[in-house]
């Protein structure tokens, strides 16, 4: 696969490498670099210098072995050669900007896609981590190309807050799917099972630990995730909890209904992040709600907006 590298990424990677070596007292590469760069100022007019600098930096980037390293990771995914028309290794501006996505190739009529992997320049100072990162991202892109996974680049929530919460959950589930398969195939990746469990656990703090661990074990072993299934779990916590049904978990842990931020209010059916606590202590409100929703119980929860509506109704009456 033909790979392209972002010139701004190359430049920063080289400067970082020179700095690290200089701090260790090794100036050999710095001297070599300047022996190539300095003559450009004397031999080329100002408008031609940027192109010359890029050529020199590209040669140094290759000499440092980074091009070969990235290509070797791409070679671990031979199926991508048939599906992608090329790859781009671009500069990420921060941790949140790192990642991968597909973009239109040069031949847009053929519907070809190029793989874009965005990486922070400092990652090239830690080769073992860099390999894990690129491998992890290429597993993501493999899923994007997979018909069985059914990936769609779409808006995940109805408003910015909902979008952020659903996206965070989606990414955690997808990372579980990615890293579990890589590890089963004997390849190093960004996080191990324990690390991914901690991320999963942090999302669902109100689910009892025994239930969370049982659910996570099922997720970790699953080989058939799809975009729609992950999105369904990211949007509705009840889909996550359903996984625990039938598993060997103490019955007491499944009796109490778990209500998490982002779930639908059973009254208005809107997703809410503001559940009212202690509603069972307000007998009047409970009775008024049950007049309209006979099957509702306080443990089912109620959002703040619905609670306020019933309080207004009480005041009017």
Image (tube, rainbow, N blue to C red):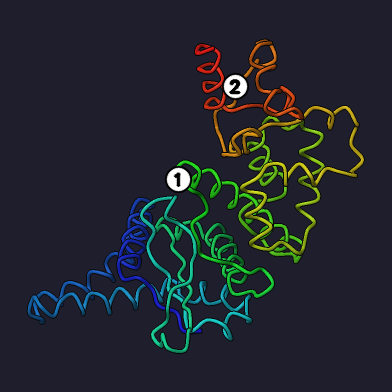
Q: Position of residue 114 (x, y in %)?
A: 46, 77
The picture quadrant where one finds residue 56 is bottom left
Name the side, left or right, on which 78 lies relative to 157: right
Name the side, left or right, on which 174 lies relative to 39: right
Q: Provide the residue designation for mark 2.
A: 276
Q: Is residue 297 above or below residue 185?
A: above
Quadrant where the C terminus is found in the figure: top right
Q: Residue at x 63, y 56 (%)?
A: 174
Q: Residue at x 79, y 40 (%)?
A: 213
Residue in front for this viewpoint, 270 or 236: 270
Q: Provide the residue designation for mark 1.
A: 159
- Mark 1: few, some, or many residues within 10 Å (few <14, many ≥20)? few
Q: Residue at x 42, y 81 (%)?
A: 105
- Mark 2: few, some, or many residues within 10 Å (few <14, many ≥20)? some
Name the side, left or right, on which 309 lies relative to 226: left
Q: Position of residue 64 (x, y in %)?
A: 42, 71
Q: How many marks?
A: 2
Q: Is residue 237 above or below residue 144?
A: above
Q: Residue at x 55, y 66 (%)?
A: 152
Q: CA distance from mark 1 to mark 2?
A: 21 Å
Q: Is residue 64 above or below residue 236?
A: below
Q: Position of residue 21 (x, y in %)?
A: 37, 57
Secondary element under disc 2, as helix, strand or loop, is loop
Q: Position of residue 285 (x, y in %)?
A: 63, 15
Secondary element under disc 1, as helix, strand or loop, is loop
């Amino acid at each position: 696969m033909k790979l392209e590298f972002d010139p701004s990424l190359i430049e920063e990677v080289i400067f970082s490498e020179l700095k690290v070596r200089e701090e260790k007292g090794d100036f050999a590469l710095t001297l070599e670099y300047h022996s190539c760069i300095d003559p450009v100022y004397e031999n080329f007019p100002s408008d031609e210098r940027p192109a010359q600098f890029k050529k020199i930096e590209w040669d140094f980037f290759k000499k440092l072995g980074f091009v070969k390293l990235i290509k070797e990771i791409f070679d671990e995914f031979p199926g991508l050669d048939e599906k992608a028309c090329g790859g781009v290794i671009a500069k990420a501006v921060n941790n949140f900007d790192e990642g991968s996505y597909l973009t239109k190739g040069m031949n847009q009529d053929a519907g070809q896609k190029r793989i874009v992997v965005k990486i922070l320049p400092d990652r090239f100072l830690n080769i073992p981590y860099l390999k894990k990162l690129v491998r992890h991202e290429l597993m993501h892109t493999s899923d994007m190309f997979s018909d069985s996974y059914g990936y769609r680049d779409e808006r995940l929530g109805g408003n910015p807050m909902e979008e952020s919460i659903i996206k965070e959950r989606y990414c955690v589930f997808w990372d579980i799917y990615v890293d579990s398969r890589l590890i089963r195939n004997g390849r190093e990746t960004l996080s191990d099972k324990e690390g991914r469990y901690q991320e999963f656990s942090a999302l669902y703090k109100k689910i009892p630990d025994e239930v969370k661990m049982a659910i996570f074990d099922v997720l970790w072993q699953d080989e058939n995730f799809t975009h729609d299934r992950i999105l369904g779990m990211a949007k509705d916590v009840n889909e996550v909890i359903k996984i625990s049904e039938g598993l060997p978990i103490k019955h007491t842990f499944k009796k109490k209904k778990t209500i998490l931020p982002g779930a639908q209010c059973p009254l208005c059916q809107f997703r809410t992040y503001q559940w009212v606590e202690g509603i069972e202590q307000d007998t009047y409100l409970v009775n008024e709600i049950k007049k309209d929703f006979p099957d509702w119980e306080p443990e089912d929860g109620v959002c703040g907006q619905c609670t306020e509506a019933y309080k207004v109704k009480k005041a009017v009456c």
